[in-house]
Each structure stands twice: as structure tokens, then as C-alpha cells.
Amino acid sequence: LFYNRFEWKINDRMVKSIGVPISSFHAHVEKSPFLGRYTFNLCEASPRTRKAIKGQLEAAYRIADAHPKSVMTDSPVMVFHAGVARDDEDREAALLRLRMNIEFIAATNKLLYEKYGCDRKVIPTIENSPNERRWICQTLDDCGRAISGYSDEVKLTLDYGHAMTVRGG
């Protein structure tokens, strides 16, 4: 709702029209079945992915700045999906690309917090994934490996339903 899906630009009209309570923000799905160009995968290290990361975090800060009474928590959460490997052999390389993007998320979030001078800091999180073949961060061990070294800046969101799909997870 808050993005021009083709150019990764923030939709200021939607930001201005917020009228409901907000306690968290959720990044969009990795690929839209309706819009083939509308993809976002944290396991891809590309300028487009970085632009999407920055756009989503900045939209959250702009909403918190423009509608302080609508944002109901002191530290709203931004939930990102960990992403999807290209194929089974790409899992370890995908985890490394995810870690590069987590580093970018941490640095970008710090800059945006300083830029907006808000009383509230958005807390970026990585959500655990369901048991789907190529998804990264299906187990808590994988999630820990993903955010290791960044856990002060990027947290985990546990989706209990996803966790229940992972045998022994």
C-alpha cells in the first residue's frame, strides 16, 4: 500500500491517509502472483533489493513521523521475510547474501532513525520461514546464524505457525 510497486518509491498519498492504529509494519511477500516485476527477496544482493529495503524502512519512519498518535507502540517492528534460495545448492550462498542485506538493514535503520529524529526507533526483524524447500531461516538455529553479529540492531520475529511446519524445529 505504501509503495509504487514498479519503482520502489514511497506512495506519499497513502502515508498521508493513515487513520488506523499501527503497532507493526510487515514487508511484502517475495513475489506477487499478479505483478511479475514486484519481487523482493532478502537472499538477493542487488541494488533493487537495497532500494526496497530502504524504501520500506523509510516508509515506516515517515508514517511514524506523520502520524505519531496512530503508531501505538514505542518501538514499532518491521518484519522482513528471510528470503528464498535460487535452488537447493544455493542455500549457503543465499544465507551469505541475506547476511549482507541484514548488515545493510542495520546501517540503513540507524541512518533513518537519525534523519527523522523520532522518539521512536523502528526495530527491524527477520521472520522465521515455513518448511518450504528453498526458504531460508526455517529453524531457530538458521535464524541465529543469519543475525549473528547484528542481534543488537536486527531481531527475530517468531511465527509460531511457520515453526510448527518444521519437523524438530
Image: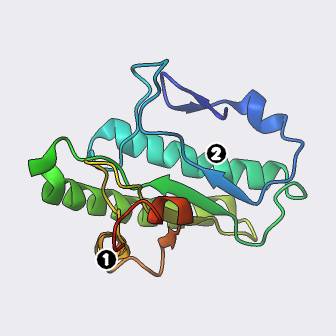
Q: Quadrant of the N terminus?
A: top right
Q: Position of residue 141 (x, y in %)?
A: 31, 77
Q: Decide which of tag 1 and tag 2 comes sooner along the chain.
A: 2
Nearer to us in this view, 47 or 140: 140
Residue 28 shows in this picture: yes
Nearer to us in this view, 38 or 60: 38
Query: Looking at the picture, which amino acid does disc 1 mark?
Result: Asp
In the displayed structure, does residue 69 sit left or right of residue 113? right
Residue 111 shows in this picture: no
Q: For the point 72% across and 69% down, which residue is it?
A: 120
Q: For the point 49% across and 71% down, which residue is it?
A: 156
| Label 2 CA crowd tier, 10 Å (few <14, some 14–19, many 20+) | some
Label 1, label 2: how far apart the Cα atoms are: 31 Å
Q: Position of residue 71 (x, y in %)?
A: 81, 58
Name the residue carrying label 2: 59
Q: Quadrant of the C terminus?
A: bottom left
Name the residue carrying label 1: 141
Nearer to us in this view, 22 or 113: 22
Q: For the point 60% across and 66% down, which residue is it?
A: 114
In the displayed structure, does residue 1 sit left or right of residue 153? right
